[in-house]
Image: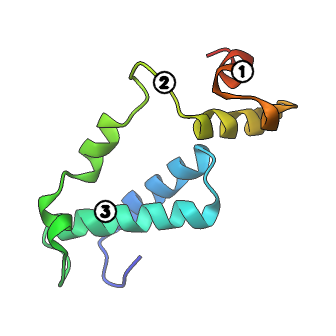
Amino acid sequence: MPRGSSPKRERQYEHIKESAEQRGESEKRAEEIAARTVNKERARAGESRTASRTSTQDMSSSRRGGQRSHSGAEGPTYDQLYAEARRRGIHGRSSMNKAELKRELGK
């Protein structure tokens, strides 16, 4: 987190990082996702000195996340299913396709 961040942004960063790790992202990738998300929210709220046009005019990160949640027809992505199978220790997961992973996970 950048210096001078508010306690709210620190909590937001930790929450996003933990959430990404639970989804199966590596720690480094989770940190990157969290930092980018928090920096964008800071820019939208006018809390940063500089901000790109897309950061301030684009859809907010929370709204985009809600639109991309897996409540759609296809459900979770292959990567999300694979990460869950890895967490559960399902053998043979690397040779499974999306449908097989869903069946094995009971989705």
Dot 1 or dot 3, earlier in sequence: 3
Which of the 4 quarters of the picture holds residue 104? Answer: top right
Q: Secondary structure at mark 1?
A: helix
Q: Secondary structure at mark 2?
A: loop
Dot 2 or dot 3, earlier in sequence: 3
| Residue in the image at 38% along x and 22% along y | 72
Seen from the viewer's position, the closer of residues 75 and 32 is: 75
Q: Which residue is mark 2?
A: 75
| Residue in the image at 51% along x and 47% along y | 19
Seen from the viewer's position, the closer of residues 92 and 31 is: 92
Q: CA distance from mark 2 to mark 3?
A: 32 Å
Asked whether the residues under the numbered discs 1 and 3 touch, taking CB atoms below 8 Å apart as contact, a structural biologist would say no
Q: Is residue 26 above or below residue 52?
A: above
> Mark 2 belongs to which amino acid?
Gly
> Mark 3 belongs to which amino acid?
Lys
Asked whether the residues under the numbered discs 1 and 2 touch, taking CB atoms below 8 Å apart as contact, a structural biologist would say no
Q: Which residue is mark 3?
A: 8
Seen from the viewer's position, the closer of residues 67 and 95 is: 95
Nearer the observer, disc 1 or disc 3? 1
Seen from the viewer's position, the closer of residues 6 and 55 is: 55
Q: Quadrant of the N terminus?
A: bottom left
| Residue in the image at 13% along x and 72% along y | 46
> Mark 1 belongs to which amino acid?
Glu
| Residue in the image at 33% along x and 64% along y | 38
Q: Which mark, residue 100?
A: 1
Q: Whole-percent x and y of residue 11?
A: 40, 60
